Amino acid sequence: MDELLREAVNKCYKNNDFIKQYNRVTSSKIKNTKQPIDILIDDATGVTDIELLKFILFVHKYVVTPIV
């Protein structure tokens, strides 16, 4: 991942308003409070990795690309 994308993803991930709207638009559940068992299941099935990859692709497409 290049430095510009990495910085954009980090800033977007730390911005709770951005995350809230991202979750609303994409029906994702990034950073939502979950029960420990749900976290374990998501990690075991790869859901967490898939959601984070989708988030990175979203930031690339809608945040980084329009700037460049």
Image (cartoon, rainbow, N blue to C red):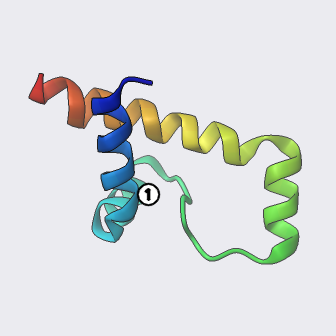
Position of residue 14 measured from the top left corner of the image (x, y, whole percent): 37, 63
Q: Nearer the viewer, residue 25 or 57?
A: 57
Q: Would residue 25 be visible to someone looking at this image? A: no
Query: Residue visible at 51% across and 35% down?
Result: 54
Residue 57 to residue 31: above or below? above
Q: Quadrant of residue 47 in the image?
A: top right
Q: Nearer the viewer, residue 1 or 60?
A: 1
Image point (31%, 54%), residue name: 11
Q: Secondary structure at mark 1?
A: helix
Q: Residue at x 22, y 37 (%)?
A: 63
Q: Position of residue 55 (x, y in %)?
A: 46, 41
Q: Which quadrant holds residue 61? A: top left
- Provide residue 38's location: percent of width, then percent of height: 81, 66
Residue 43 is left or right of residue 18, and the answer is right
Q: Give the left or right position of residue 53, taking residue 1 as reference.
A: right
At horizontal 85% and vertical 43% (from top left) the residue drawn is 45
Q: Amino acid at mark 1?
A: Asn
- Which residue in the protein does label 1 denote? 23
Can the viewer see residue 57?
A: yes
